[in-house]
Amino acid sequence: MSRHAYALTCPEPLAAAAGELIFARGGNAMDAAVAAAFAQAVVNPLMCGLGGDAFFCVYDPRTRETVMIEAPVTIGSLATPSVFEPLARGRAERVGRFLVEGDINQMGYGSIMVPGFVRGLGEGFRRHGSGRVTWQEVVAPAARLAGDGYAVDHVAARAWRSREPGPGVPDVFTKLHTTPEARQVYLKPDGGGYRVGDRITLPDLARTLERIGERGASEFYEGETGRRIARDMEANGGLFTWDDLRGYRVRERPPVWGSYRGLTLASCPPPGAGPTVIEMLRILEHSDQAALHWNGPAYLDLVARVLAAAFGDAAVWQGDPAVVEVPLEPWISREHAAEQYARILREMPGGAETPRAASADDSRGIPKGGMGRGTTHITAVDEDLLIVSLNTSTGSTGSSGVVTPGLGFLYNNFLGQFDPVPGRRQSIAPGKGSGGASSTIFFRDGRPVLATGAAGGSRLISAIVQSVVNMVDHGMTPAEAVAVPRIHAEEAGILFAEPGLDEVTAEALAARGWEVRTSTYMGRIAAVGIDPDARVLYPASDPRGGRGVAAGPPR
C-alpha cells in the first residue's frame, strides 16, 4: 500500500479533481475540501450547492481539538409557526418530511430557508485554511467547470432520473417546473433531464461563483448577489428578508462525543445526526457482532431492530437546542442503550440466537491497514493529519425548484423538515436551523483513525453505522466496508434491502416479522482510514456514488 500525503473522498470525481488541484498547489485538507465543495455545487447541482447548508467536523492536529463549524439553513423571519397548519397531512417516515397539501413546503419560494453554504465554506477556509492558497484560487475550479461545461456523470444523471414521487418528496421534474428559470437552467431545451455523458454549461452560476471568488463569501449575503436574492424573495413570497440574509452567522460548537468498542467518536450535535449514530453503536456494542453470521438473518434482524429503535428516539427527541430542550445525556447514555438492547432481545424471535453481550470496554479497534437524498459529503485528510469531514445539502433531490434569474443555483427546500403545526418540538419558528448532517471522526487513544460521513437523508445514518461495524467487528478495510450490501430500517416492521439479498435470507427475515422491500438507494459514504503512526491514509469512496478519490504521495 503506497503512502499518501493526502486523501480526499466524495461521490463526484470532478469535485475530487478540484480538491486535488488545490493539494498540488500546497493547500491543506480544508483548502481542498472547500474547493471540492464548490465544485460539487456545479457538478451535482440538484443535490447540493450555494442555496444549501454546510456542516464541518474538523480535527486540528496542532491543538488536538475537534470542533464543529456549522452553517445550517435557518428559518426566515416571515415564516410564522402556523404558515402551513391548515394544509398539514402528517409525516413521511419517522424522521422524514412533513406532509402539506400541494407540497408547498417542499417546493417553491415558501419552502426556502436562509442559505448557509457560502458563509460556512468561507468560515472553514478562514479558520483552518493553510494560507498558501487564496480564496479566489479555491473557488476558481468550480467557476471554470460551470463556465466551460462538463460531462454529466452517473451520480448527477441519477438525480434527473428521479421521476418516482414519494410522500413529501415531489417528482424532480415537477420541482424543476416550479420556476421558468429552473426549467431553463436545469432541463434540456426539449424539457428532458440530462443523461450520462451529456454536456451541461452553467454560465450564470459561473458568474456568481466568479463574484464570490473575487469579493469573498460576504458577497452572497451583503453584496450584489445578496441584493438580487432578497429582491427575488420579496417579489415572490419568500419567507426570508434582506435583513435575515445580511444577519446570517456561522456557529462553532463542540461535537457530541460517543464510543464504540474502545474507540471514541466526535459527530454532529443536535439537530445533527450524531446522537442517532452514537445510540445505534452503543446498542450494538452489547452484542457480539463478530460471532454472528455477517448479513445472515439473525444479524440483519438485530441490526434492523437497532436502527428502527434509534430512529424512533430521534423522532421524539431531535431538535435545535437553541430553541427547544434536547435530552442529550439520557438519549446517548449507556443506560438507555442497555435498556433498548434488552427490549430488542425480548421482542426478537429466537432472541437467544444473539450471542453473548460484549462488554462496553471491549478494546477491539479499527485494524491498522484495514479499518434526503439531496446531500453530498467530502472527507479530506492531509499529511499533518488535519481532518475535514464536510456534509452539504439543499434538501431533497431538485431542492425547491427555485432559481433566481441570473444567479444559476437552486435554493434549498428544508422548511419541509419542520412541523407545520405550531406548539410542537419541531414546529416552524424563525431562526431555527436545519440538521441531519453526519460528519464524524473516530479516535483510538486520542489519535484519529477514521473520518467518515455520507449522503442519503436518514439512510446516511444507517450507512455510517453499518460501515463502522464492518470495519471494527468484521475486520474489513475501509474500501470493503463502504462497498458491501447494507440495509435500512426506520419504520416498525419495514426493512429495506439492496438488490441481491438472497431469497432464503429474505424469507427468514419475513418469518421474523419484517416486510422486506428492495431499494437501490442506501446512501453514499466518503471515508478515509488513518494509521496515525505510519501516516498512511486509506481513502474509501462508496461505489454507490462516483468514486471520487484524490490521493497523493508525500510532497
Image: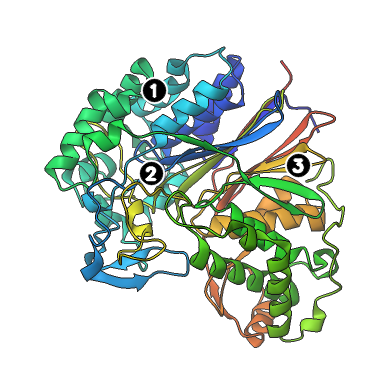
> Which amino acid type is marked by label 1?
Arg
Residue name at image x 52 percent, y 58 percent? 326
In space, the residues marked 2 and 1 are separated at their CA atoms by 26 Å
Q: Secondary structure at mark 3?
A: strand
The image position of residue 265, as x and y in percent, is: 70, 47
Q: Is residue 399 left or right of residue 355?
A: left
The image position of residue 415, as x and y in percent, is: 33, 54
Decide: few, some or many residues near mark 3? Use Cα within 10 Å; few <14, some 14-19, many ≥20. some
Residue 443 numbered tag: 3
Residue highlighted by disc 2: 73
> Which amino acid type is marked by label 3?
Phe
* 241 to 524, vertically: above or below: above
Q: Secondary structure at mark 1?
A: helix
Residue closest to the eye, 288 or 426:
426
Residue closest to the eye, 205 or 196:
205
Answer yes or no: do the residues labelled 3 and 2 have beta carbons within 8 Å? Answer: no
In space, the residues marked 3 and 2 are separated at their CA atoms by 29 Å
